[in-house]
Structures are given as structure tokens and as C-alpha cells.
Image (cartoon, helix red, strand yellow):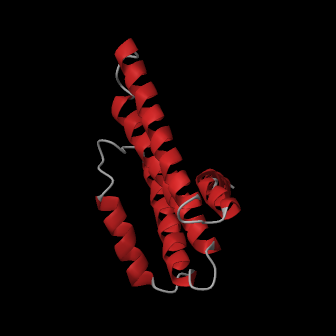
Amino acid sequence: MIPFPRMYTGLRGGIERRLPPPCFASPALRGILRALILAAGAACSLGAVLFVWSPVPLAFGAGAAISVLNFLHSARFVQAHMSERFTVALHLRLFFGFCARLVLTGIALYLLLIPCSLPAIPLLLGLGSTVVGIVVWSLLQMSGKSFKEA
């Protein structure tokens, strides 16, 4: 049970408005992104509140936020260019976009690990939270479909 249904509905609606349909036409992708953004936001908020006692929740939230941003930009690029013919120019844009995200992620991780001194293990767990979120979301969707069919 969600403790604050009105707040959850407002956040969900706000996220939905900021995921433009031309870039995110797939309802499944929109559902995954909505769930991941809400989870990363909750992790970051909880980490900011609990930072006084331990930097671990903040490190996890920062890793989750980085991972969700990478997934969001990758999904936006793929959705926007999925119908285009695969040319050399598109291949180069995909490659250099990936490299730019990789460099920015590396800079962010360096800043979080070295100057901010956040612990590495929770940060890495946060980076993996997107994959876990996608797997859980997929399993929930499959279980829901099998129950409807039975």
C-alpha cells in the first residue's frame, strides 16, 4: 500500500507529462521509465535525509539516478531513430552518443568517489538498480498476463 496516494499520483502524472509520446511511444517503455524514475527519486530523497547518519543511502541514490539518466537518454535515442534506415551517419551518432554518456558517467563517478568520498559498493549497487528494476517490472508484467489468461 502506498502511504501517500495523492502525492504518488501527482508525481506519476508529472513524470508522464515529461515523457513526450513521440520519443517514448511504447507503453511498456513508459511504464518502466516511470517506475525507475520514481524509485531513483525515492532513493535520492531518502539518501539526502539519512546522509547525516550514513552516506550509504545517498551513494545508492546517486548511482540509481546516474543509471536512470543513462537509460532514459539511450531509450530516447533508440525510440526517436528506430524507424530510420540504419546508415553510417546514424551508426556514428549512436556510437558518439554512447561515448559521450560513458565519459559523463565516468566524470560523475569520479566526482562522487574521490572528492565526495561516497562508498563505492552502494554506488555500484545503485548503478545496477535499473537492470533489477527492468527485470522486476518484466516479471510482474508476465505474471499479470498469465493470471489474466488463466
Q: Position of residue 46 (x, y in %)?
A: 54, 78
Between residue 46 and residue 37, name the one nearer to us: 46
Residue 5 in sight: yes
Between residue 144 and residue 33, name the one nearer to us: 33
Q: What is the quadrant of residue 11 in the picture?
A: bottom left
Between residue 93 and residue 35, name the one nearer to us: 93
Residue lying farthest to the front in this orientation? 115
Residue lying farthest to the top in this orientation? 88
Instruction: Give the residue displayed 29% in from the left and 60% down from the top.
Output: 17
The quarter of the image holding the C terminus is: bottom right
Instruction: Give the residue displayed 48% in from the left and 76% down from the top.
Output: 45
Labels in figure, total? 0
Q: Position of residue 141 (x, y in %)?
A: 60, 54
The quarter of the image holding the N terminus is: bottom right
Residue 32 in sight: no
Q: Position of residue 121 (x, y in %)?
A: 70, 60
> Where is 33 relative to 55, above or below?
above
Instruction: Give the residue displayed 36% in from the left and 29% down from the top.
Output: 81
> Where is 14 relative to 26, above or below?
below
Q: Position of residue 62 (x, y in %)?
A: 53, 63
Between residue 94 and residue 35, name the one nearer to us: 94
Left or right of residue 143, residue 27 in this image: left
